[in-house]
Amino acid sequence: MTRVFALIPTDLEEGRLGHGRSLGDDLGGVSVLEQTVRRALRTEGVEGVVLVHPEGQEPLGVLSGEAAGRVTTFADADGLRDDQTARLVSARKWALGAWRGGLGFATAFDELLPPGALLRAAESVGADSALLVRGDWPLFDVGYAEALIRSHVASPEHLKVTLTQAPPGLGPLVLSRRVLGDMAEHAGWFGKILGYNTFAPSIDPIGREVTHPIASSVRDCARRFVYDTPESIGRLRGVAERLGGGLATADAQAVTDACRALESGDGGFWFSRLPQQVTVELTPRRPVSGPITPQAYVDFDRPDMDVDLAERVVGELGAAERGDVALMLGGLGDALLHPEWERVVRAADEAGVFGIGVETDLAGSWEEVAPLLDLPIDLVVVRFNADCSETYERVMGGDFTRVATNLKRLFEERGARRAADGRGSQVPWIVPRLVKTAETLRDMESFFERWLRASGYAILSPSCSGCGLMPELSPVPMEPPRRVACQQLGRRMSVLSDGRVALCDQDWLGRASLGDARADSLASIWARCAEPFAAHASGRYQELTICGSCREWHRP
C-alpha cells in the first residue's frame, strides 16, 4: 500500500518569492497556516501531515492545540533553499498568475521546492509519496488533492506525478518519493519534468493522464491565490470576506467565482493599482535596423529618457502597493544604448522593484555588455532572430559573429563565476529570442533546440506591426476569426522614452497615449485606461485610435 503524507514547506516569515509576511496572520478566524493544515488533515488518502520549515522556526506555535497535535515537523538546516532557489524565483516573476509559463518552463509547483528538504522529510516519516502544498496556500482544493491521490495510488509507477492546471495556490501536486530523489540528485525542478525536453520530446502533460481535468472557469482564472505578495494577500482577504463562513470548505470553483465577483463589483478595479508587468523604453534607438525591426520603417523621433525621469518612474514602481511589479527595460529600443542604463537598473533595485529585465540586441563591445552580469538583473532577453549569419545579416542587418560571441561569453563568464565562488546561481537568465517571420522560419527549429539546451530557455515571439506601422511579416495570420476584448489592456503598461504612457505595447508612436509621466504619476495615468477598457468590453474597437487596425488583441 502506498503511504501518502502531506508535506507542507512552511516559512513563517517569508514567501518563496522573497516577500515578508506572517503565516500567523488571521484569515477567516484562524491563522493562514492553520487554514492550510486543516485542509490537509481532512484530505482523504493522507496518512499524516509534515510541516517542513527552516531550522529555528516553530510553526506549531501558530496552530491551535487540536491542529498542532495532529501534525509533525521537520526542520531544514538549509532554510528551504538550495542552489536553484534564486534561479527559480527569477523564473517565476513574469508568470505569477499562471500555473506554468515561467522561464525554463518554471511552474507554480517549483515554488514548493527545494526537493532535497522534501525528500529528507519524506524519508523521516517513511512516506512513499507526497501531497505537496505550501503553508501559504490556505485555499488549495481538497477535492483536487483527493482525486490526484486516487490516480497516483492506483498506478504509482505509471503516474509518478499528478497535477491540475489550477491557478497558483489552488492546485496541489502529488508525486512519488522517487521523483523527489531524482530531482534532488540532478538539481531538477518541475519545469524540467513538465516542459519541453529536446532530448526526449513527448506529448504535453496537460493532455495526458497525469493531469486531472478541472472546470475551464477555474483553469482560466489567471490569478495568484498564495499568501505572499501584497497583491495576492489582498486578493485572498477579499475572497475570504466575500465567502464568509464558507471559506474553510470553499473549493476552487467557489474561490475563483468569489474572486471574479470581487473584481467585477468595482468598475475601476483593474486600474485602481498599477499592472504587474511594466515596460520602460529608455531609448528608441537600436544598433541594427534590418527589415525585421520597426526602425527600418518608422522614424522614432523622440529622445532618450531623461535619467531623472527614469529614476522617478522606477521609484514609483518599487513603491507600488502591489509589491510584485516586473519591470522590463527595453520596449522598442536597446536599453544598453542609454548612457545611464546601469544607473537606472541600480535605482530600480534600490527602490524595491520586484523583477528587473533588460532587452538588448547584444551588439556592443564586451565592455558594454559585461555589466549585465554585475547588476541585480533577473532576465536578459537577447533579440537574436536567427540561427546563422546569413539569416541574421538579412533580417537584422548586423554582425552575427559579434552577437554570438557576446552571448557565448556571457554564458561562460556566468558559469565561471558560479564555479569559482557560487556567485550568480545562474542568474540572470540569459534568453535568446526569435521573432517568427517568413524569413526566420527556416531557423526557428534549430534556434529553439540550440538555445533551450544552452540556456535552459528560448523565446519564439510573434511578429507585430504596431497597428500597421510596418508590414505584417508573420508567416500566417494568427488572430482568431471572432474578435473579443483585448487580452493585454489591464495587464501591461508601456512607458515611452519621452515619458508618454502608451495605450499598449502596439502603440509605438503614442498615438493613443494615456498621459505623460513627466507631469503625472503612473498611477493616475493608468487609471485613465478604464475608458478604453470599457470600450473593448462592449465591442467598440473602432472608436479607439489604434485598436480598429490591431491584429494582436488575442495575445495573452
Image (cartoon, rainbow, N blue to C red):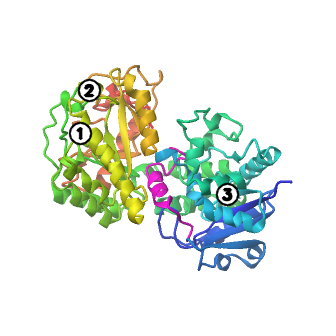
Q: Do callouts 1 and 3 mark residues in contact (Cβ within 8 Å)?
A: no
Disc 1 designates what residue?
A: 402
Tell which of 10 and 316 is nearer to you: 10
Q: Residues within 10 Å of mark 3 (few under 14, many from 20)?
A: many
The residues colored magenta run: 79-102
- Mark nearest the camera among 3 and 2 is 2
Q: Which mark is residue 34?
A: none
SS label for mark 3: strand
SS for dot 2: helix
Q: Which residue is mark 3?
A: 132
Left or right, residue 401 beside residue 131 = left
Mark 2 Cα-neighbour bin, 10 Å: few <14, some 14–19, many ≥20:
some
Q: CA distance from mark 3 to mark 2?
A: 47 Å
Left-right relation of 488 to 48? left
Q: Identify the amino acid type marked 3.
A: Leu
Q: Position of residue 153 (x, y in %)?
A: 80, 48
Q: Amino acid at mark 2?
A: Val
Residue 500 position within the rendered picture, expressed as x and y whole percent measured from the top left:
22, 46
What whole-number distance in Å separates the C-alpha atoms at marks 1 and 2? 16 Å
- Image quadrant occupied by the N terminus: bottom right
Point out the tag, 1 or 3, that comes first from the N-terminus.
3
Is residue 303 rendered to the left or right of residue 102? left
The answer to whether residue 503 is visible is yes
Give the mark nearest the N terminus, 3 or 2.
Answer: 3
Q: If you read the primary sequence from the N terminus, does the residue marked by circle 1 or circle 2 appear first?
A: 2
Q: Residue furthest right?
A: 1
Residue 82 forms part of the magenta stretch: yes
Name the residue type under label 1.
Arg
Q: Which mark is residue 395?
A: 2
Q: Check the image and report above or below for 195 versus 526.
A: above
